[in-house]
Amino acid sequence: MRGKGLLAVLLLAVLLLPLAGCGFKDIDKRFFIVALGIDAADEGKGFKVTLRLAVPSPKIEPGSALSEVKTIQAPTIAEAVRLAKSHVDKELDFGHCKVFVLGEKLVKKNYTDVMEWMSRRRDIQSVAYLSIGRPDAQSIVKIAPKTERYPGNALFLAFGVDGTESSYSISTYLFDFNRRYGEHGMDPVLPLIRKDPQEGDYFISRIALLDKSKMVMLLTPQESQLYNQIANRFGKSTIKATIEEENIVLAANSVSSSYKIMSDQDGNQKLRLKMKISGLFEEAPLGIYEKDWHKLEQTLSEQTEAQIKRMLVKIQKAGIDPFGFGLKYRATHAGNDQTWKTWQKIYPELEFDVKVNVHVEGTGLSR
Amino acid sequence: MLNRIGTIMAQAKDLNTHRLQNKERTIELAYISSLCDESKVSDFIIVPFMKEEEDFLTTLIHNPNFTELNDTAKWADTLLRGFVLISAEQRIFTLDAARIIRSETPQTQVETAIMGSQIALSEDLIDSINIIRTRYPSPELAVEETTLGNVSRTRTMLVYDNRRVDPTVLANVRESLRKLDVDFVQAAGQLERLISGRKRGLFPTMLITERPDRITGSLQAGKVVLLLQGSGFALIMPATFFEFMHAVDDEFDSFWMTRFLIILRYGAIILTILLPSLYVAVVSYNPELFRVQLAFSIAGSRSAVPYPSFIEVMIMLFMIESLIEASVRLPKYIGSTATTVGGLILGQAAQQAGLVSSIMIIVTSVVAISNFVVPVNNMSVAIRFLKYPLLVPAIFFGLSGVAVGIFVYLVYLADLRSFGKPYFRILGPTKRHTGDIGQVKPS
């Protein structure tokens, strides 16, 4: 009896063996895609998908990163990726694909198809970074910086917090983009990667603002930094002012911001944005130590207030809401459809009241 | 008497039988010379009998060294334990003349501690009791003796602190010893398997130790200790899983370092159980778990390996296990050669020949090293096995399979009882004299 039971278990185990089948695929039989670029097709409808495949090597040192780039055109992205499989000898794996670059032209037209595909595929990680490529995604994905230690490293570092932390760029995770895409009262933002034609590499210094289906506007690097300071409370940034025709740059150590939506007596809605920035002078004329710091702080505050207000109005005119003002309004008011409709009426006429409080901690010199 | 003994015992060269005669009476002697100290026999029996300073029968009756034995059935037994049988005037007396070959008091070798006791239990029961008694000078220390094994008749001592011991556990231990029906008992580990209830248990539910300080500590905590004649190891029961991870040093070394070491031990057993299966699961099913950098370097170093990951793991595990086994079996002087040959040369060569990846070499050595971190040897051996069953779900189902496997282990651990006490209880003290989880509260 006992022997029979054991035999049955063994038999079952043997039957299970061929089931290892497709799920079981060793790491060296997989091709890791490290970056994926999606453009609109050159002609007609469809997409042009560019894959950057990592060529693994046991040695990791700067300049030894090898990768292959494949470009495939197909009516849909899913088909393009399936087609790509016939171009390579190993199984494609999106598990390590942390950077998705969307072509600027595509995003300006409509990005919803791409969005759908990315959020449905199970091997695409939600923590992947999303960005826009200029002039197109293909040329960004093709760039292989010389300093790269392993394929795709440069782009990962540019977006992650491990490497550079630039106040001019943001990193947008796929899940965050997805959330903003579906949420009433908050619109998606993406960093823009530009190719540097002379150097042959890329730089990220502008932020693109999108509505629920396409790209609407681009912020200048200056505005991008302001956006980062307001929305992400990004320290390690600067604010600039011109006093008596001399440039003063303050390196912010800490930035805090908060806003409130309130209505005044007449029923007009007003948004009050309060910011506190404190830091050290990074660039200032000589003899600033003796000057009246209060005055300097005030000038810095006023000029920053003006810049912020200009940007907010510009964004308001474009009819998008990257900061999530609408979401805040919905969160602090009754939770029904009416609130959302009210907000849609309020937002175009919303007034901004920006208060910036700059605090100078020191001159950056020991005296 | 001598005739009857001749019929009971098999033909034995070392069975000595004498018939002595003096002026008054005749006595008969029987003993097994190899078990007895012949000088004792002559000092206590032959010389006084021949000198005839007083009547020998009175000596037999009044000298406490001699005890009367009325049960004929026990003759063979008594002889085999090194006693001398004396027959005088139709009465049978016994004298303990056992000679036991003992080496010097042994040093701890299996479970060493740098600043702890350096003396281990002796293979001789009396010496062991001596070691324990000197370390536990309490009138409450109870010592019960029984014999185990139908053939081996191994003397066994049950030692406990009468005031602190949990009576339910004690009753439990006595009951399982009484029920034991086996021919030979030779080692503490064998007894542990026989009385633990689960014949194919994955984990030991009794602690086996050679350290007297661990034993006295357990006695003080109200545990029962079993000592076996001929085995330098004692069984401590009941035990919890966590006691196996506890070295005696933890009590007297630097506080923070020992806490850290305890955590390290748990980390090490998790590694040694999980690493091989995690390697298979991650390399073959979920490579996205690694950081990119690691994924690429593993993929790079694996590219020369012709076999799927689980074959690779099996090759290396086979190698490391045979290495460990070889170093246990080899004579001490050749032992180090085996490790050098196996560890350095085979590992390096296997990787260069492209049979296994360099990461796999690291995995194997981590598995082997962290296995030896467990302070108690019988747990260490039990844990050595645990990685193999986990490989199966890893091969078929990847990471989720490993997770299910760990869950199964945890459920099994939680189900285990050591003499009625929960084996894997994390919270709550083990109360004495009251009902416990899994027991009926005494009314």
Image (tube, helix red, strand yellow):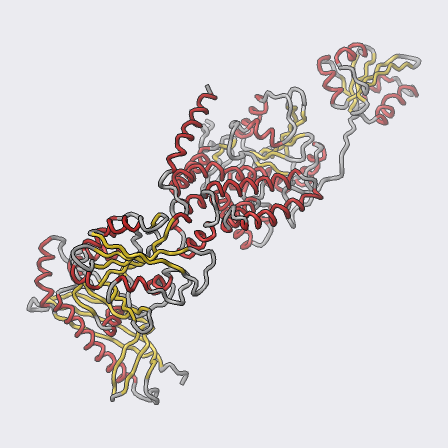
Number of callouts: 0
Q: Where residue A179 appears, x then y in whole percent?
A: 22, 55
Q: Position of residue B296 (x, y in %)?
A: 42, 54
* Quadrant in which the N terminus of chain B appears: top right
> Residue reaching furthest left?
A266
Q: Quadrant of residue B222?
A: top right
A329 left or right of B337?
left
Residue A243 left/right relative to B106 = left
Q: Residue at x 64, y 35 (%)?
A: B233
Position of residue A337 relative to residue A234, above or below, is above
> As rendered, which of B156 and B306 lies closer to the eye?
B306
Quadrant of the image occupied by residue B441: top left
Taking B282 as reference, is A106 above or below it?
Answer: below
Pick whichever, A149 or B5, lies toward us.
A149
Q: Is residue A212 in sight in this rendering?
A: no
In this rendering, does residue A208 appear at all? Answer: yes
Q: Is residue A114 above or below residue A201?
A: above
Q: Residue at x 21, y 66 (%)?
A: A208
- For the residue pair B327 and A337, the one nearer the viewer reads as B327
Residue A95 at what x, y percent from top left?
Answer: 34, 51
* Residue B371 pos. (x, y %): 55, 44
Instruction: From the viewer's side, name the closer residue of A94 and B94.
Output: A94
